[in-house]
Amino acid sequence: MTLWADPDTPNRERKRLLAHIIEDVTLVKLPAEGTTKVHVRFKGGKIQTLTTLSPKSSAQQVKTQPGIVELVDKLLDDHIYSEIAELLNQ
């Protein structure tokens, strides 16, 4: 672990270390749950399964939150765009 955490260890060496201990990795996406299961098979035969949140798509990352859209809709009743922008920036 000391070698791995050493800031002087280049990433290419970290990759080489992993290549010596990991046989293969399988990713199983579970879209309904919004997670990905990661099955890691080590060269000694041990298998480790991890679950992680799936990354958001680029469209999901830039999509405006529904609450903000609702707020802008309400503000449009009494304000123009520049006033709404100023209110949101505050």
Image (cartoon, grey):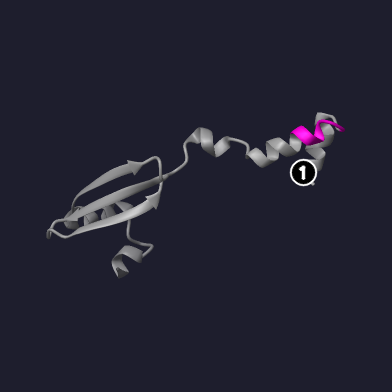
Residue farthest front in this picture: 32
39 and 17: which is toward the camera = 39
29 and 19: which is toward the camera = 29
Stretch in magenta:
73-78
Please give the residue where the numbered disc 1 appears in the rendered image: 89
Rendering coords of residue 72 (x, y %): 75, 35
Q: Is residue 3 left or right of residue 63?
A: left
When asked about the image quadrant of residue 2, the answer is bottom left
Q: Is residue 3 left or right of residue 35?
A: left
Q: Is residue 72 left or right of residue 83?
A: left
Rendering coords of residue 42 (x, y %): 17, 57
Residue 89 vs 74, above or below: the answer is below
Residue farthest left in this picture: 44
Q: Tag 1's secondary structure?
A: helix
Number of callouts in the render? Answer: 1
**Amino acid tagged 1:** Asn
Q: Is residue 66 magenta?
A: no
Residue 81 vs 22, above or below: the answer is above
- Residue at image coords 23%, 55%: 18
- Residue at image coords 69%, 35%: 69
